[in-house]
Image (cartoon, rainbow, N blue to C red):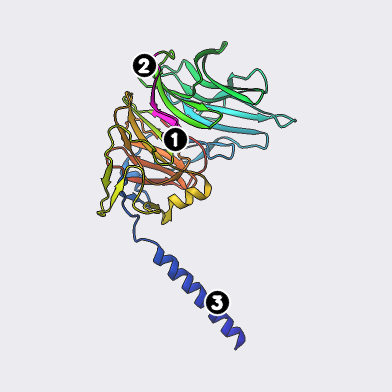
Amino acid sequence: MRILARHLSVGVAIVTLLWVASACQPEQPPRSSTISQWNYPIPARSLNLRGQVVFAPGDGSLWLQSANGGNARVLVKSTGTNYAESPTFSPDGKHVAYVKTTYDQNGNAIGDIRIIDLAGKDERVMAAPPDIKTSFSFPAWSPDGRELLFTRTTVVAEAASDEIDRVSIAGGVAQPVLEGGRAATVSPDGKKIAYLRLDFKLYRSSLWVADTDGSHPKQLVDQDTFVQLQGARFSPDSRTLVFAASGVPQKQLPGLQSRRDAPDGTAQSQTGTADGCVSKILFTCWVNTARAHGLPWDLWLVNLDGTEFEQLTRIGADSPYPAWSPDGKYIAFMDFSGLYVVNRETKDGYLVSMNGGHGSVDWR
């Protein structure tokens, strides 16, 4: 009888837990002021997503898969001494540029810029740092595929500085483009670059655009607006930038209404949400989950003169890194819980695959 009673008590406890869990889960992901509906599982084939994505899940490996979530395969394997990150397709889609960080016997990290073909072969070093005080990161292709831009970071006497350099795919010495910039990306029409400036003392970033030679810089987002910024990318028509920002904006951004009405009738401000868990995906509160892993991030859009901002998501994701679809209809990003796409116009979001992580993604 004691054994039976013990089993019954355990059974009651399990049923109670399941009931509480189900009671906390909505029948479908709720709507917010910027996301009309997040669908799970994704009707990937009905979206007719074309092309391939390359992504770095954060464990040192690189992966390729079709844009609809299938046929995932390793491009660069993760090892104990090598770490691959920041992959980006060449304009013709035949190669991937990335950062390969190698740790020497003294534990020093040495990051160089490499390219590799889609079969995982023909790997070549495009730029290697001259010493352990210098690191290279954030490769970006020129639209004609003849050059790579990258970030040179130098640390001297506990102080750090950034510089955007360019190097020819044919080989040669890297040339400086812009002092103080990092994480550059080139517009598809070849006329502009977008980049960040990082305040190493406060660790706050600002977003800028300039001509491709580094002239005529213009600030779009100052370092006091968001907690942090990353992943600026031009739309295929070169007219819009998407970027990821952590925290809510501390300043009124041009083109945004001061208040928005959510579909459920609740009022929401530009710098907040109606409750602490307004957006759930896969029945999980992304805001609370992201805070458990790090600061919550969202995707934003801005035109190149900084007069129109638009919040694309309100999900509090964990360090998303955006990438445009080739046709400009969707924006992909990767989170610890999977790979997602957002419809640019409707803001509907879809889970593509459970292949997630803390890293970057590109789409061709």
> Where in the figure is residue 95, as x and y percent of width and height?
49, 25
Residue indicated by mark 2: 191
Residue indicated by mark 3: 10
Magenta residues (range): 216-233
Pointer 3: residues within 10 angstroms few (<14), some, or many (20+)?
few
Residue drawn at x 34%, y 39% as measured from the top left? 312
- Element type at mark 3: helix
Q: Amino acid at mark 2?
A: Lys
Whichever of callouts 3 and 2 sits on the residue coming sooner in the sequence is: 3
> Where in the figure is residue 294, as x and y percent of width and height?
52, 45
Task: Tell me the CA gap for discs 1 and 3.
Answer: 46 Å
How many dots with numbers?
A: 3
Is-magenta flag for residue 228?
yes
- Element type at mark 1: strand
Residue indicated by mark 1: 53
Q: Is residue 240 above or below residue 245?
A: above
- Element type at mark 2: loop
Task: Tell me the CA gap for discs 2 and 1.
Answer: 25 Å
Is-magenta flag for residue 155?
no
Name the side, left or right, on which 112 lies relative to 330.
right
Whichever of callouts 2 and 1 sits on the residue coming sooner in the sequence is: 1
- Given residues 14 and 295, the one toward you in this image is 295
